[in-house]
Image (spheres, rainbow, N blue to C red):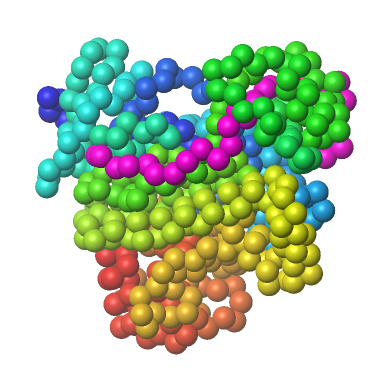
Amino acid sequence: MNGTIHPVIVVGSGPTGLLLAGDLATAGVPVTLVEKRPHKISNLSRAFVLHARTLEQLDARGLADDLEAVGQPLDRLRLFGDLTVDLGALPSRFRRLLVLPQYEVEKVLERRAVAAGVEFRHETEVTGLSQDADGVTVEVRGPQGAETLRAAYVVGADGMRSAVRDAIGLPFPGKSVIRSVVLADVRLAEEPETLLTVNTVGDAFAFLAPFGDGYYRVIGWNRARNVPDSEPLDLAEVKEVARAALGRDFGMYDARWMSRFHSDERQAPAYRVGRVFLAGDAAHVHTPAGGQGMNTGLQDAANLSWKLAQVIHGHATAELLDTYQAERHPVGKAVLRSSGGLVRLAMAKRPWELALRATLTTVLAHVAPARRRMVGQLTGIGYRYPAPRGAHRLTGTRVPDVALTGGRLHEALRGGRFVLITPGAYDDQGARKDRLTVERWASDRRTTVLVRPDGYVAWAADAADTAQIEAALAAGVG
């Protein structure tokens, strides 16, 4: 057995694992990231969208500007061909979504993780895992052969076929909802009129998104052609699906890669078993509709990382880790439901399905509260976390990037600290200066708010004295 104790081992170096590992290392927690693939960021990503809430989380880490420099903003979405959703009214600094391939996100997150001191172990595969009251034993096989590692906590961010999830015996219930989806990276002789091109006609669905290097990712599906993933695929079939759904194939040529896959809807019943956690696709997988998969995984990581850091540094008890399941499992379930609903409505064929879609489109177009709720779920800004009975009405809600006398909230959150926002002066006497930033409202607001490192309200009071604030800091910050 390796004699080194690793405080945290993260398995999987996709976006979720990279953000989580980078957060922990930035917070001073030594992290080892285990990845079975060689050290090469793949361009075979399926994710192409960052939503507003994810951009807010990345802004709180100083990463959003880098990604916006390589991505392309989109301030409106078209659903079901008839409904246009304007994102310009979002209560966020990011009144848009950002179109860019997943590998660009991974590049930025990997640079941050390396700079923070994450130890990477590529070409290393998890072959077994067991845990006891004091830690987790992880069996791996890497370039030097079999090895056993020991960690205080392990996070499985290793995708839909998670070795970590299998090792702790968790099922992954659900089903395949779309089979024989075709993927291709192609050049186009004709440039699309819109940044994202998506449509459904009859049995056919197609989606086009730019890589930014002259190639476009095509995702297509023909319900009438249900064949195994192993069935050969050629460009003629990709073009046929595009013509059926989009009316033309844009002169697709020079395919550098093509493949088939099937889309599942699955969710693990638990995101935590003892000292082992699941995040991202290891915990939940959804249909591609709405582009929520990568975003949900990144927000899992943002929720879990600060809690692990608090517990490992001794500022909170292990009970804090139970809130990861309580907060993120319902969100995963909601995304599963909403993304699946979008697919089913988009592919509606029976008269009653078409009638339901028409009714929903009318409601969303003309009823502002319904539209705001739908957009809030799609972009992630509409979710709130459960609050204890009797807590202030703001507890568990997301805090926008409010103006402070010292700058913006997202700037104050950088470094993984809590932020106490008060209407007046408060002296924390330096006792928590390594994990707490004290700020004042730039406005005349009188509420006192303690913001968690992930940007949600831990505690609030309309009028608070020093004793109340101290009690809240002791309970939240430690």
Q: Is residue 86 above or below residue 218?
A: below
The image quadrant where one finds the C terminus is: bottom left
Q: Is residue 208 above or below residue 24?
A: above
Residue at image coords 47%, 52%: 332
Residue 315 in which image quadrant:
bottom left
> Nearest the camera: 128 or 17?
128
> Nearest the camera: 315 or 278?
278
Q: Is residue 286 above or below residue 417?
A: above
Residue at image coords 12%, 28%: 3
Residue at image coords 77%, 40%: 202
Q: Is residue 415 above or below residue 130?
A: below
In the image, residue 450 lies at what x, y percent? 42, 70
Q: Is residue 175 magenta-colored?
A: yes
In the image, residue 108 lies at what x, y percent? 54, 34
Residue at image coords 75%, 13%: 254
Q: Is residue 377 in sight in this rendering? A: yes
Q: What stretch is highlighted in magenta?
A: 168-196
In the image, residue 49 lies at what x, y percent? 64, 42
- Indicate left or right for 36 with 52 as reference: left
The image quadrant where one finds the N terminus is: top left
Q: Is residue 471 magenta-colored?
A: no
